[in-house]
């Protein structure tokens, strides 16, 4: 079946699913494959659960006319998304960066959705599967699309841009993330800037944080919209407050590093003519979820700052900087390993330990095999089970605790023990 015919079937509902546990009625099921699963085996089950069609790439599973055989399911999903993008008369904002891209995406969506029908990346579905799924979740009624793009190797952002064909782009920052794939900070800058190169080539526009000299340099020949420089950072103790249009906005976001994320959302809101009242309402009511700088109060009057969604050297230092400013005499940090840092991994973990010492964060616990190999005066714990036993034996009252680590560490599990 050619892509036009497949698109006609998809456009009957504008629904796509890849997980039979979450099948929606009249959806088109794409039977993706991974190391430990084969979606082809669930093609018939998807139809029984309400899917209109199943797309497979193994002939033995194409047992009815509702199960459509293609050469490669993933490639077909990507091609369908690209075709759909060409049909959409919708401006699309793309964003990437080392840190803060998901929070920034959520803030932009919160602001724009006050006056537009928006569709944005759900969670962090920002890779070669998530981006096509985001595009295919947009319908003719979508007025603005917001697409987050992640990458851990060169040419991935370029590829995602070729599918999305964005009208606008924003890069949050360049930091030490995914060094295993990018090789160095210079490699990160080169890879993330693939978005700038695509937008330059297609004569589209970028939003630029002019306080970042790298962004200014990289965008000097591209159509640029500078972030609003009249927005002022008032403070972050612990929540960020800013001044915008002569008014003070009190947010639910922790950490001064979120000031740039807020500035981007406000600037993009102003560009799309969102009223000041709606910008204020959206930024003040947005509350982070999914283990991103969440503030949790325990019954023992302990305050937990849970930032365990992800971690790299840049975001770890930013979180520690913010935590060091909190006015509390009884503070503890629980830091988990940072993954995908390549050959410099052990040194980067040692750097974080040394930084904790510089900030005089004495009550520190470092968790995981990488931290365990470093030198510290703090406590090193190799496994989560050991951490669990240690925390359970403590009487944690009236403390401020920062919990941060890479997603694979799943340090949010410790909250139930502290609670």
Image: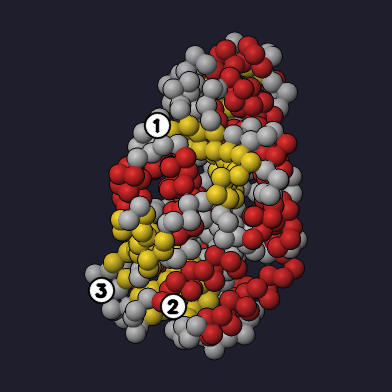
Q: Is residue 21 left or right of residue 70?
A: left
Q: Quadrant of the C terminus?
A: bottom left
Q: Residue at x 59, y 83 (%)?
A: 354
Q: Position of residue 290 (x, y in %)?
A: 42, 53
Whichever of callouts 2 and 1 sits on the residue coming sooner in the sequence is: 1
44, above or below 195, in the image: above
> Which one is nearer the viewer's eye here, 326 or 55?
326
SS at badge 2: helix
Q: Position of residue 289 (x, y in %)?
A: 39, 53
Q: Is residue 336 left or right of residue 349?
A: left
Q: Disc 3 marks which residue?
A: 301
| Viewer can see residue 165 | yes
Whichever of callouts 1 and 3 sits on the residue coming sooner in the sequence is: 1
Distance from label 2 to label 3 (Cα)?
19 Å
Q: Disc 2 marks which residue?
A: 324
SS at badge 1: loop
67, above or below 154, in the image: above
Distance from label 1 to label 3 (Cα)?
41 Å
Q: Tell me if label 2 and label 1 are in contact, CB under 8 Å.
A: no
390, above or below 167, in the image: below
Q: Disc 1 marks which residue?
A: 116
Whichever of callouts 2 and 3 sits on the residue coming sooner in the sequence is: 3
Mark 1 vs mark 3, foreground winner is: 1
Mark 1 neighbour density, 10 Å: few (under 14) some (14–19) many (20 or more):
some
> Which one is nearer the viewer's eye here, 165 or 387?
165
Q: Tell me if label 2 and label 3 are in contact, CB under 8 Å.
A: no
């Amino acid at each position: 079946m050619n892509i036009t015919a497949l698109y006609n079937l998809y456009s009957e509902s504008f629904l796509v699913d890849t997980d039979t546990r979450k099948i929606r009625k009249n959806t088109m099921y794409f039977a993706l494959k991974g190391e430990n699963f084969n979606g082809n085996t669930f093609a018939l089950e998807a139809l029984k659960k309400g899917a209109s069609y199943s797309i497979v790439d193994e002939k033995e599973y194409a047992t009815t006319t509702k199960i459509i055989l293609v050469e490669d399911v993933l490639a077909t999903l990507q091609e369908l998304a690209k075709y759909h993008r060409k049909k959409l008369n919708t401006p699309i904002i793309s964003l990437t960066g080392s840190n803060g891209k998901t929070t920034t995406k959520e803030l932009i969506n919160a602001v724009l959705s006050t006056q537009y029908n928006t569709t944005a990346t759900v969670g962090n579905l920002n890779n070669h599967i998530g981006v096509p799924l985001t595009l295919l979740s947009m319908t003719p009624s979508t007025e603005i699309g917001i697409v987050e793009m992640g990458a851990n190797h060169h040419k991935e952002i370029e590829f995602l841009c070729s599918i999305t064909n964005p009208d606008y782009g924003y890069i949050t920052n360049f930091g030490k993330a995914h060094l295993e794939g990018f090789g160095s900070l210079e490699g990160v800058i080169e890879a993330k800037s693939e978005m700038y190169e695509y937008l330059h080539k297609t004569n589209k526009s970028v939003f630029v944080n002019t306080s970042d000299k790298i962004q200014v340099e990289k965008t000097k020949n591209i159509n640029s919209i500078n972030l609003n420089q009249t927005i002022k950072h008032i403070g972050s103790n612990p929540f960020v407050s800013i001044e915008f249009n002569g008014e003070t906005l009190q947010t639910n976001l922790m950490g001064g590093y979120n000031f740039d994320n807020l500035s981007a959302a406000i600037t993009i809101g102003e560009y799309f003519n969102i009223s000041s009242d709606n910008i204020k309402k959206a930024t003040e009511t947005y509350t982070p979820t999914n283990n991103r700088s969440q503030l949790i109060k325990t019954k023992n009057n302990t305050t937990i700052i849970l930032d365990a969604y992800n971690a790299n050297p840049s975001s770890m230092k930013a979180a520690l900087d913010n935590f060091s400013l909190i006015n509390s005499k009884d503070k503890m940090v629980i830091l988990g390993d940072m993954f995908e840092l390549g050959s410099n991994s052990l040194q980067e973990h040692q750097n974080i330990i040394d930084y904790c010492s510089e900030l005089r964060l004495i009550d520190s616990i470092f968790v995981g095999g990488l931290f365990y190999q470093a030198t510290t005066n703090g406590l090193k714990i190799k496994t989560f089970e050991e951490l669990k036993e240690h925390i359970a034996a403590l009487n944690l009252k009236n403390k401020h605790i920062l919990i941060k680590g890479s997603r694979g560490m799943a340090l949010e599990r410790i909250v139930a023990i502290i609670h």
